[in-house]
Image (cartoon, rainbow, N blue to C red):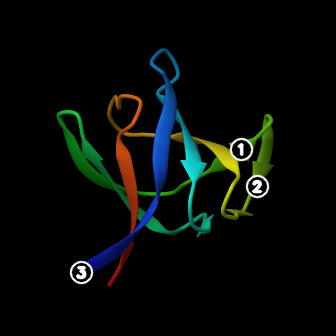
Amino acid sequence: MTGTRLGEVSHFYDRISVAVITLTDSVKVGDKVHFLGHGVDFEQEVSSMQIEHEAIESAKKGDQVAMKVLKPVKPHTAVFKISE
């Protein structure tokens, strides 16, 4: 299992468990991602994403996406896209 850096968490909304991620690569619903850093190390599948409160299926480099996460994350946590 290998991965490429997808981006970095810029903000986390703990009440709704949503992370805002600034992308350095493209991502789509269904991709597996790995959150790593600041006491966080877990993987999950991207089940949904939003940009400006609009649901999207994919996003590209430079976008800021909101993504539901399984565990709390902190700003500057690295996000990687996992490729089998």
- Residue where numbered disc 1 is placed: 50
Where, quadrant-wise, is the C terminus in this rendering?
A: bottom left
Disc 1 versus disc 2: distance between alpha carbons?
5 Å
| Disc nearer the start of the sequence (2/3) | 3
**Circles 1 and 2: CB distance less than 8 Å?**
yes
Disc 3 is placed on an element classified as loop
| Disc nearer the start of the sequence (1/3) | 3
The quadrant in which residue 25 appears is: bottom right
Q: Residue at x 24, y 81 (%)?
A: 1
Q: Amino acid at mark 3?
A: Met
Disc 2 versus disc 3: distance between alpha carbons?
26 Å
80 on left or right of 22: left
Q: Residue at x 49, y 54 (%)?
A: 7
Dot 3, crowdedness within 10 Å: few (<14), some or many (≥20)? few
Q: Amino acid at mark 2?
A: Ile
Against 38, residue 26 (above or below) is below
